[in-house]
Amino acid sequence: MSSNIVVATRNLELSYNPNEPIIKDTNISINKGDFIFLTGKSGSGKSTFLKALYGEIPVTGGELQVNGFNLKNISKNSLNLLRRHTGVIFQDYKLINEWTIEKNVILPLIIAGYSKEVCTLQAKKLLKHVRLLDKANKYPMELSGGEQQRVAMARALAHNPKLIVADEPTGNLDDFSSEVIWNLLKNVRQHVGSTIIVVTHKIPPTISIDFKQYYIDSGTLHEII
Ligand SMILES: Nc1ncnc2c1ncn2[C@@H]1O[C@H](COP(=O)(O)OP(=O)(O)OP(=O)(O)O)[C@@H](O)[C@H]1O
Ligand SMILES: [Mg+2]
């Protein structure tokens, strides 16, 4: 696989139940630095595809390669390595309610073993970016849905991941906060060279990013050209 390719599939099939594929016949390749919007009807399999990219659900047919790892029968060690270079923003945030906002944001850095100084500095920088510096010591339940979403975004970017996958990252945000998120993703792509895959129901009309659009039609992912 060329080192420029970040995600490649060959006849990919993903299913939760035998003989009921959610994703099928999918042959795509996503390059380093691509900014992808993934669209499709509710229930079409957008979240399912994202989950397969970081090994949350198994590959049930065909091939899926991400950052050089073959996701089919991937070992626990390889999966940990892959996840270390992936930033995930979940549809339901998945923040740790017992931890402060600041600690939630630096979770990927704690896992990677960075010093307290590095963690604190990076947390401050990211919280400033998502306009939540004043809430650093609060807990997730003390924040609004949109604020929690921005914490989830900051956390996903904390370790400068090679691949960022985001499930409806602006779903709960007003226009101003959405703009903050799009700009943040744009900056990370520019400065870190990350590849970004975003699930969205609607591509923001004012977005100033050169992007590619993929669509799920009857279980098959296609690039819309
Ligand atoms: N854990 C699961 N077990 C069985 N079926 C599932 C599971 N998760 C999702 N599905 C089914 O897979 C299909 C695709 O779900 P998915 O969550 O990927 O859709 P989606 O495109 O993200 O939809 P939305 O836009 O509403 O978030 C749905 O029909 C759903 O019922
Ligand atoms: Mg979904």
Image (cartoon, helix red, strand yellow):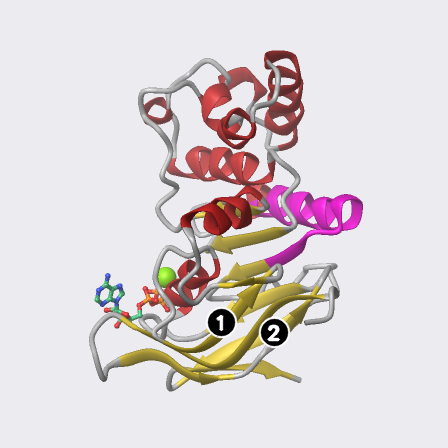
**Residue 77 vs residue 117: left or right?**
left
Q: Quadrant of the N terminus?
A: bottom right
Whether disc 1's CB lies below 8 Å from ligand 1 is answered: no
Image coords of residue 50 (percent x, y): 45, 61
Packing grade of label 2 (10 A; few <14, some 14-19, many >=20) is some
Q: Is residue 135 above or below residue 3?
A: above
Label drawn at residue 39? 1
Q: Which residues are magenta?
A: 178-196
205 or 69: which is nearer to us? 69
Examine the structure image and report whether residue 128 is included in the region drawn in magenta. no
Type of amino acid under label 2 = Gln
Q: Residue at x 51, y 28 (%)?
A: 105
Say which quarter of the image contains residue 128. Answer: top right
Examine the structure image and report whether residue 194 is included in the region drawn in magenta. yes
Q: Residue at x 62, y 35 (%)?
A: 159
Image coords of residue 13 (percent x, y): 39, 79
Q: Which residue is mark 2?
A: 213
Secondary structure at badge 2 equals strand
**Residue 43 vs residue 176: left or right?**
left
Image coords of residue 66 (percent x, y): 57, 62
Q: Decide whether the magenta segment is chiefly helix, strand or loop.
A: helix
Q: Is residue 222 above or below residue 140?
A: below
Type of amino acid under label 1 = Thr
Secondary structure at badge 1 equals strand
User: Are the residues at dot 2 and dot 1 in contact (C-beta closer than 8 Å)?
Assistant: yes
